[in-house]
Amino acid sequence: MTAYLKSWLSGAPPVATPDDDVPTFLRVSPPASDDGEETEKEDDDYVPAFPALNSAQRASSSRPPPRILSDSALMPPPPVPSLASRTPGVSSKSPSSLLVPTTTTQRPLKPTKKREKVALAPGHSPLDWAALKSSGTDLRGVDSLARIPPSVLKQHRSKDDAWSAFYGKVYNITPYLAFHPGGERELMRVAGRDGTELFAKTHAWVNADFMLDSCMVGFLIPEPAPDSP
Ligand code: HEM
């Protein structure tokens, strides 16, 4: 066994039969045992060549055995891109989709209007509002829902009595003023009128219908004609 491994590692040329031009290895797998008792475990890892090196299939093949190329015969490596010479913000002369994206030297646009959250007083968090509106406390201030034209809505525009319409429904927003994350002042801008547009422009993702359900006082209707009963 040891003798076999030594000959394998030293790269000894294969022994060819005289009248056979196909390289043939006389022995393609380790012998069962060179020196009698030594049958090591590693032998199990041996992977036989396929087709076997001395098979009829290989012998009949007209293809020459694979040539091992020397370093100089190999394809040269690709040129190294000179990233160091790249100027940020300036595109290269030969733009390629594989290039590193150029960075911008432009200053970011200024936001048109700063949207700021106000500090809410203790006990006025969104969770506190959720608790209050589901507590059963009367937040409407009316006995029943009414049909409310803009002229009636207009009469409720003080902090103590503020109504506003969102998406066709009229709400008493007074109880919510102190809970509004955008502040009382912002919310009071729509007191006494239809605030749908401003609301949607500010935060269309907020569900007004859900947040103010317990403050609803009625439905916004068009102003009735002066001569109608
Ligand atoms: C009664 C109806 C309204 C309700 C239920 C409401 C509710 C809310 C909520 C939940 C937030 C927090 C949003 C967030 O964190 O994403 C908020 C923020 C804000 N709201 Fe309102 N809002 C109402 C009406 C308005 C109106 C009419 C205006 C403008 C005139 C306004 C202006 C703001 C501003 C400036 C903020 C802070 C900025 C922000 O959070 O991004 N809100 N509002």
Image (tube, rainbow, N blue to C red):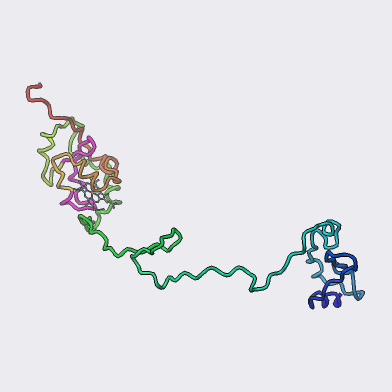
Instruction: Out of 134 and 203, give the one closest to the viewer.
Output: 203
Residue 133 spot, x, y in % from top left: 27, 44
Classify 187 as above or below 226: below
Which residue: 79% across, 62% down? 49
Residue 214 spot, x, y in % from top left: 25, 40
- Which corner quadrant of the image does residue 194 belong to? top left
Magenta stretch containing residue 175, yes or no? yes
In this picture, residue 22 sits left or right of residue 181:
right
Q: How many marks?
A: 0
Which residue: 24% across, 37% down? 167
The magenta segment: 163-186
Which residue: 20% across, 51% down? 178
Instruction: Out of 121 and 206, give the one closest to the viewer.
Output: 206
Residue 185 spot, x, y in % from top left: 15, 51
Q: Which image quarter holds the N terminus? A: bottom right
Which residue: 16% across, 44% down? 190
Classify 188 as above or below 64: above
Instruction: Out of 102 and 41, give the one closest to the viewer.
Output: 102
Residue at the outermost right position: 36
Residue 121 is at least partly visible in this image: no
Instruction: Out of 60 and 184, give the one closest to the viewer.
Output: 60
Residue 51 spot, x, y in % from top left: 81, 58
- Which corner quadrant of the image does residue 75 belong to? bottom right
Residue 217 is at least partly visible in this image: yes
- Which corner quadrant of the image does residue 25 belong to? bottom right
In this picture, residue 61 sits left or right of residue 74:
right
Q: Which image quarter holds the C terminus? A: top left
Magenta stretch containing residue 15, yes or no? no
Classify 120 as above or below 163: below
Residue at the outermost left position: 227
